[in-house]
Image: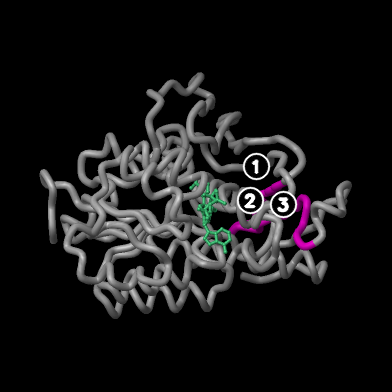
Amino acid sequence: MQRKNGKLGIALVGLGGYATGQLAPALLHTNDCYLAAIVTGTPSKIPVWQDQYHISDKNIYDYSNFDRIKDNKDVDIVYVVLPNNMHAEFTIRAAQAGKHVICEKPMAITVSDCDRMIEACKKANVSLSIGYRLHFEPYNKEMMRCGREKLYGAIQQLSGGFGFKAGPNQWRLTQKYAGGGPLMDLGIYVVQALCYTAGMLPVSVAAQEGTKTDPERFKEVEQSLTWQFEFPGGLIGKGESSYEDHFNYIRAEADKGVFELTSAYNYNGQRGNTPAGNMSFAQVNQQILQMDAFARSVKNRQASIVPGGMGRRDVIYLQAIYEAMRSGKKIRI
Ligand code: NAD
């Protein structure tokens, strides 16, 4: 394992909005990893990134010569930040190059792709993690704790939603690249939050597609979607996601009162309260914490707390929600 000041080298694959706006800036402040290499199909980005992040010529790749990263000792971890349908290919190629992998959410478009990704990482003896940054965010961690420890008694009502307006003409609105609409992109956060707030995993789901007020923009994917998870014991967790309407919450009504996040899923600005009062935690940089935690887990040969298996589980839920939506039937999970 090659280390620069004890830090592991990360290669970012795909220099789009998330890599540029969040991950690379965060990597200037990480303690256990740093930005060692980039993989891009857009040559004009190279000088800008090299200048900003001091990346040497030998650590620049494109999608066709990416496999040569196998011989690059500067790179310990490959972080796949591409459109959803490309996650499987690049995770598998990274594993075959002997690199540990962080793959963005959703892990893949199909469960069989998730299986191939997990298998490739297992075979190469590398660790696989999903970009679930909220597991490192204090307000969401508090919801996990409330759910796990049943701090406010049994939950009677549970609901969550994430939606915002998505502009036209982007891969996120295509079935091929995104694998679906707002559910794949935003609803996945709600799927996660319903599970970690309930402290349980669902046994079945029903779902309904929302009305398309803009059928042109939403030719291929849903504009909005609601679903209802049934948890063991009968608790219903209601979820909603939309590319048109704004909402951003998770709310549990328990025996001893309500605990909720009224701003839940953004990069910052979380707000929440419990029967004990308003939550008050320091704002953190989720991406720094997430990438450092993974780098430390690699160094210490421990599993990621957001492993490939969790990404696969969620893809199963996303697929079940779509099946329930299309069939109009309750789907057992
Ligand atoms: P983006 O469209 O801004 O960037 C995608 C990148 O992939 C671009 O650099 C583009 O050039 C490249 N690319 C390579 N081949 C492509 C192709 N055939 N079509 C389109 N683009 C291609 O997207 P993004 O917002 O950076 O999202 C990338 C991934 O990161 C997605 O899986 C998304 O779900 C995930 N993401 C996660 C978070 C988070 O908070 N964890 C936030 C944003 C995005």
Residue 304: x %, y % from top left = 31, 57
Looking at the rendered structure, the kind of residue marked 3 is Asn
Separation (CA) of disc 3 from disc 1: 21 Å
Which residue matches tag 2?
187
Task: Please tell me whether the stretch drawn in magenta is mainly helix, strand or loop.
Answer: strand
Screen quadrant of the C terminus: bottom right
| Residue closest to the eye, 7 or 119 | 7
Which residue matches tag 1?
162
Asked whether the beta carbons under mark 1 and mark 2 sit within 8 Å of each other, the answer is yes
| Residue closest to the eye, 260 or 14 | 14
| Residue located at (50% from left, 58% from top) | 82
Residue 26 falls in image quadrant: top left
Which residue matches tag 3?
169
Asked whether the beta carbons under mark 3 and mark 2 sit within 8 Å of each other, the answer is no
Mark 1: few, some, or many residues within 10 Å (few <14, many ≥20)?
A: many
| Residue located at (39% from left, 43% from top) | 23
| Residue located at (68% from left, 48% from top) | 239
Q: Which residues are magenta?
A: 220-242
Screen quadrant of the N terminus: bottom left
| Residue located at (82% from left, 67% from top) | 328
Residue 329: x %, y % from top left = 79, 69
Q: Secondary structure beneath disc 2?
A: helix
Residue 330 falls in image quadrant: bottom right
Drawn side of residue 267 relative to residue 96, left or right: right
- Counting residues from the start of the chain, the first of labels 3 and 2 encountered is 3
Mark 3: few, some, or many residues within 10 Å (few <14, many ≥20)?
A: few
Q: Is residue 266 above or below residue 212?
A: above
